[in-house]
Image: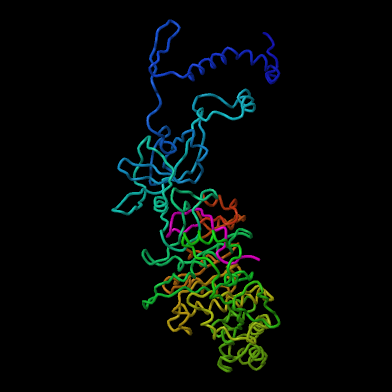
Amino acid sequence: MSDLGDFTDFEDDSDTESSSHTTDASATEEAQTREQSPQSDSEPSPDTDGVSFETYDVSPAGEDRGIGAVSVSQGLRVAEDGDETTLRAFVTTGNRDDVRLGKYLLVPYPDDELLFCRITALEYAQEFQTDDATEIHARRAMRQQGFEERDYKFVASLDPVAVLFEQGDELKRRMVDRVPKPGAIVAEATDPEQIKTGLKIPAEGVFLGHLSVGGEKVRTAAEPPTIDYRLKDDYTDGDPLVFRHTLVAGGTGSGKTHASKNLLRQLLDSDRTYEMDDGRDARMAVVQFDPQDEYAQMHDDNPAMTESVARRYEREGVAHGGHDDTIALVPKEDGVPYGGDNHRAEQLEFTIPFSMARDRPWLVAGSSLNENQFPALKELLRRFFRQYGDEGTYDEFLTFLDDPALKEELHESGRVHEATFDAVKRRVRGVPNGVFDQSARPITELDHELVRPGGLTVIPTYHLSTSRAKEMFVLAVSSMLIDDKLSNTPDSQRIKQTPLVLGMDEAHNFLADADNVQARKVVSKFTEAAKQGRKERLGLFLITQDPQDVAEPVFKQVNTKLVLNLGDEDAIKSVNIPPNLEDKVPYMEKGQMVVYSPDNSEPVELVGLSTCVTRHGE
């Protein structure tokens, strides 16, 4: 047997290899020359024997339509169980570079109905039965500048979303109940009405952003070429979704404040009103708690807004520009100043009167109380206000607790054990000094400033000295709003009769699950507000980078979730969005988001406005 040598040294045999292919290459070139030689239809083409043959034009008639056709090579099946559906399309060579995961496609039925689909997988398959996992194939590929697309099949797996059909002059959708025909033409969806109908996106409502796939806006043949995504905001098919609560979740730098400002500005548009139970149409009021002193900037125009961007927003019906009716309602803490030099909104200080603790004893709990201590606190507060009236102050309550006769009386009567009394007294003294009864107007007297139809009230908390002080101000004001909204005998008719969005940034700090009485009381109050929000025209607008920490009873009442970039796996899992979109969340750029609102549309990916509609940042 002769020695064939080392196969891997075929690099050095290039001359031999070239020589061995000379005959084949020459034949190929000769054939290509014959094919490319211009021949008239009427001119004979002589062969080597002198026999003439007439040539014919074999160019295909018509033009290619779509990007490919439905394939049945691996089955064609539409089933109620999506996992059993098999719907695949062969994509022709010239269209392959433009096909992306998530793109929306249309497949026609013979009777003019359309199957609206989404690409869920893309794959190459061999056109010819060859083994390309070999050394020689790999080495040849390394020397080449590409490959022939026509040598491979390119197949897209499709997820059927809806069937589109015309009813009169209206395009409508229904669940998928038909299988397309083999060989049906598959085309990219480019008509805005078809795409919006297929995804169940309302034609009107609160603007959130533009439909996108993989971070790129979906383009159509219409003007404007983008597809606006809107949140249902009328009573045609139920209550406006803003009253069914919204969650904005995103990590630091994801653009969640930018997106939140854009959304809130739409709610405050002068043309947007909501029908009340008494038949009135009233504008929305927004109360926004602000831990970073950013939202009062909504009073000012965005200096980065160009005329061309402003005109584009106007064409698309996007409200923009600073909101004049903006007030910064500033919590007053003794000895703690508020800067407020990054906006031009009106500033008005307020304080929490200790009388609010009569119905909200958890305001003075200081830290966790157990099941025995909390009732004791309520008993002490009841006795205090019976003696001092609503004018009683926090300092007077501390003096009241220092009375040894009171402690002895309650112990001997069996109402409050002396050890429990001492524990409550320590908790009450743990409340930050300078929060109650400061030299400012009580919040209970500022209901008309706090809630204004068409007005934005921002409550900044970044300047407060401790997290406990921030918590007390936020929960005092929010509980006052919720109590009046849900009560049949409210203290403030203004609050009761005005549509209201209660916005809370860093919501996880105030609505977290905790194993103590006062935390459960707060969560219970917000859960009740969430459940009755639709009826009372009250919407919660929660913003957080830790959605997994928001108490489940509140979280599960949220209907609309805007999910921006989140890097934490637990946070991503907690928002409970479809797996195909969940996988995209860690890779989203600033301003990209997933919208999951089952009562509004199919789950979709959006790109928010790149230029904030109001001032944002420095």
In the image, residue 441 above or below residue 605 = below
Quadrant into which the N terminus falls: top right
Does residue 521 appear in the picture of this structure?
A: no
222 is within the stretch colored magenta: no
In the image, residue 171 above or below residue 543 = above
Question: Residue 256: which quarter of the image?
Answer: bottom right
Tell me the chief SS of the magenta region.
Answer: loop
Q: Nearer the viewer, residue 483 or 379?
A: 483
Question: Residue 375: which quarter of the image?
Answer: bottom right
Residue 20, position as x, y percentages in the image? 62, 13
Residue 272, position as x, y percentages in the image? 44, 69
Does residue 92 appear in the picture of this structure?
A: yes
Residue 495, position as x, y percentages in the image? 48, 80
Whether residue 271 sits left or right of residue 215 in the image: it is left
Q: Nearer the viewer, residue 484 or 183?
A: 183
613 is within the stretch colored magenta: yes
Q: Nearer the viewer, residue 441 or 15?
A: 15
Whether residue 266 sits left or right of residue 193 in the image: it is right
Coloring basis for residues: rainbow
Please count the marks in the image: 0
Residue 180, position as x, y percentages in the image? 36, 40
Quadrant into which the C terminus falls: bottom right
| Residue pictured at 64% horizontal, 28% vertical | 142
Q: Which residues are magenta?
A: 595-618
